[in-house]
């Protein structure tokens, strides 16, 4: 039984070489040629393997896993914004801060050319000198220790910051940077919290399909060149068309006071912003206590399981822990009082299905945890990981119901109440295999366009 709650996205691969019919070659010449060619073939094989070998100790994967970057590179090349290699193998390497500045210079219109004089750690004849200086001066690129470090690895944090601020989404970033509830309570936020959310809501981050989950990385880790190319291609689209409604909604982000009993639970959820979406994931590293997973990260129900099953449970005795690990088990759990999604408060669970309110409880395909005021935190495949979304702009037609688990131990939960919401009717979707709740796959976006909100 699969634990994940998102649609599996699998892609085939193709061979890039051409096969030609061999001609007869004298055996002596063939032997000599083979001996001479062997070292070259070995070097070529090692080079290809190195290009396809992910950093960070991951298992080797076919270069085809980065084929999505080829299309992004081609789109950028058509707009004369890319002059580098376009093969999937070449795009498998880790990106550098120099790669980021080069793409920002072309996509965002930063000045080109050398600065002419040394600046920080940038040589006067560095061709990206002017662009790097402008990016740092505008706050798009940080200068740790006073140095720009153009040839250092580029992290997801760096890329999120550069593109969200460079594309004019600073108001949303600033609003999330002042995160507090209605009582003024502040929470401990992870590094890059605000830009991680805005980047995901803008469609700048991509989820690897379940077959390639071993490639998923946290925002604090290096970003691959294929992912950077995709961010640049989508950034170009956003620059032309403006940010999405989900990003604009973040500019007015506000949540009510969180029930003190639920503050630790909410805090644990917020601490995972920046983690990737991993099919069947419920832990911060592959060594999950339930079952080993491909990489550290969460699927939608895995994040909920994590925040409810870690921490000091003895100090949180006023809460009923949702039953089970999957979206299915948590939504049919009668210990939780069923409520309308509009009334969900911090800590309540929100469920989605392909037919909205008409979806049977055991067919829920996605879930998140409410923060109140129609905001939720969730791990979404369509968003590329853990983020905060505004329910009316995420998947309104798919909203089913919410459940509250705020009750004293031993106190019977309120019986299921009818949902009073009336989402727009949608056509029923085929039922997934028993025991495998899955979300309907959204249309695949073009590489230059932001990802459409996906159900999970």
Image (cartoon, helix red, strand yellow):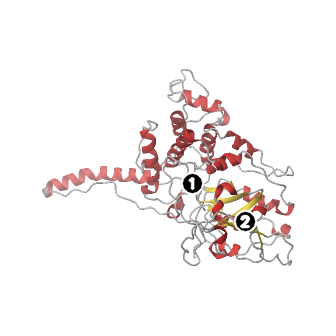
Q: Position of residue 59 (x, y in %)?
A: 49, 60
- Relative to 43, is 174 above or below? above
Tell me: 260 left or right of 82.
Answer: right
Q: Quadrant of the C terminus?
A: bottom right
Residue at 79% in and 53% down: 255
User: Residue 456 or 452: which is nearer the viewer?
Assistant: 452
Q: Which quadrant would residue 3 be assigned to in this image?
A: bottom right
Q: Position of residue 260 (x, y in %)?
A: 86, 60
Q: Residues within 10 Å of mark 2 (few under 14, many from 20)?
A: some
How far is disc 1 from disc 2 in space, using C-alphas? 24 Å
Q: Which mark is residue 421?
A: 2
Q: Which quadrant would residue 374 be assigned to in this image?
A: bottom right
**Pointer 1: what residue?**
452
Q: Position of residue 26 (x, y in %)?
A: 12, 56
Tell me: 370 left or right of 275.
Answer: right
Q: Secondary structure at mark 1?
A: loop
Q: Which is in the foreground here, disc 1 or disc 2? A: 2
Q: What is the total number of numbered labels drawn onto the structure image? A: 2
Q: Which mark is residue 17?
A: none
- Relative to 270, is 151 above or below? above
Q: Earlier in the sequence, mark 1 or mark 2?
A: 2
User: Residue 372 or 354: which is nearer the viewer?
Assistant: 354
User: Residue 145 or 290: which is nearer the viewer?
Assistant: 290
Residue at 55% in and 70% down: 429
Q: Residues within 10 Å of mark 1 (few under 14, many from 20)?
A: some
- Relative to 140, is 385 above or below? below
For the question of whether residue 191 can be seen, the reply is no
Q: Position of residue 427 (x, y in %)?
A: 57, 68
């Amino acid at each position: 039984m699969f634990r994940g709650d998102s649609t599996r996205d699998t892609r085939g691969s193709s061979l890039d070489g051409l096969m030609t019919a061999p001609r007869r070659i004298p055996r002596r010449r063939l032997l000599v040629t083979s001996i001479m060619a062997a070292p070259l073939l070995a070097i070529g094989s090692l080079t290809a393997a190195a290009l396809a070998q992910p950093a960070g100790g991951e298992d080797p994967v076919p270069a085809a896993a980065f084929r999505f970057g080829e299309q992004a590179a081609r789109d950028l090349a058509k707009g004369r914004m890319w002059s580098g290699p376009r093969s999937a193998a070449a795009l498998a390497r880790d990106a550098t801060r120099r790669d980021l500045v080069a793409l920002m210079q072309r996509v965002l219109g930063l000045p080109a050319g050398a600065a002419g004089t040394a600046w920080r750690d940038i040589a006067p004849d560095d061709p990206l000198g002017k662009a790097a200086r402008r990016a740092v001066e505008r706050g798009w690129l940080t200068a740790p220790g006073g140095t720009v470090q153009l040839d250092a690895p580029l992290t997801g944090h760096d890329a999120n910051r550069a593109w969200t601020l460079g594309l004019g989404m600073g108001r949303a970033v600033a609003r999330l940077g002042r995160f507090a509830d209605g009582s003024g309570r502040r929470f401990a936020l992870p590094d890059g919290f605000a830009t991680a959310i805005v980047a995901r809501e803008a469609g700048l981050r991509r989820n690897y399909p379940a077959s390639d989950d071993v490639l998923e990385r946290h925002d604090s880790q290096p970003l691959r060149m294929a992912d950077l190319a995709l961010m640049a291609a989508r950034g170009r689209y956003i620059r032309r068309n403006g940010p999405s409604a989900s990003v604009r909604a973040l500019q007015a982000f506000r949540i009510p006071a969180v029930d003190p009993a639920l503050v630790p639970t909410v805090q644990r959820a917020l601490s995972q912003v920046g983690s990737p979406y991993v099919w069947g994931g419920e832990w911060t590293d592959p060594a999950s206590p339930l079952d080993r997973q491909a990489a550290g990260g969460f699927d939608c129900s895995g994040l909920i399981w994590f925040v409810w099953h870690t921490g000091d449970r003895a100090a949180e005795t006023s809460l009923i822990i949702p039953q089970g690990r999957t979206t299915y088990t948590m939504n049919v759990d009668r210990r939780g009082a069923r409520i309308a999604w509009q009334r969900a408060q911090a800590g309540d669970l929100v469920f989605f299905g392909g037919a909205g309110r008409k979806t049977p409880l055991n067919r829920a395909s996605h879930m998140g945890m409410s923060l109140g005021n129609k905001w939720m935190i969730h791990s979404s495949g369509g968003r590329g990981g853990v983020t905060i979304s505004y329910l009316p702009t995420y998947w309104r037609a798919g909203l089913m119901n919410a459940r509250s688990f705020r009750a004293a131990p031993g106190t019977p939960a309120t019986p299921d109440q009818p949902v009073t919401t009336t989402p727009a009717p949608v056509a029923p979707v085929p039922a997934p295999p028993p025991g495998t709740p899955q979300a309907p796959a959204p249309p695949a976006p073009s590489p230059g366009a932001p990802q459409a909100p996906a159900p999970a």
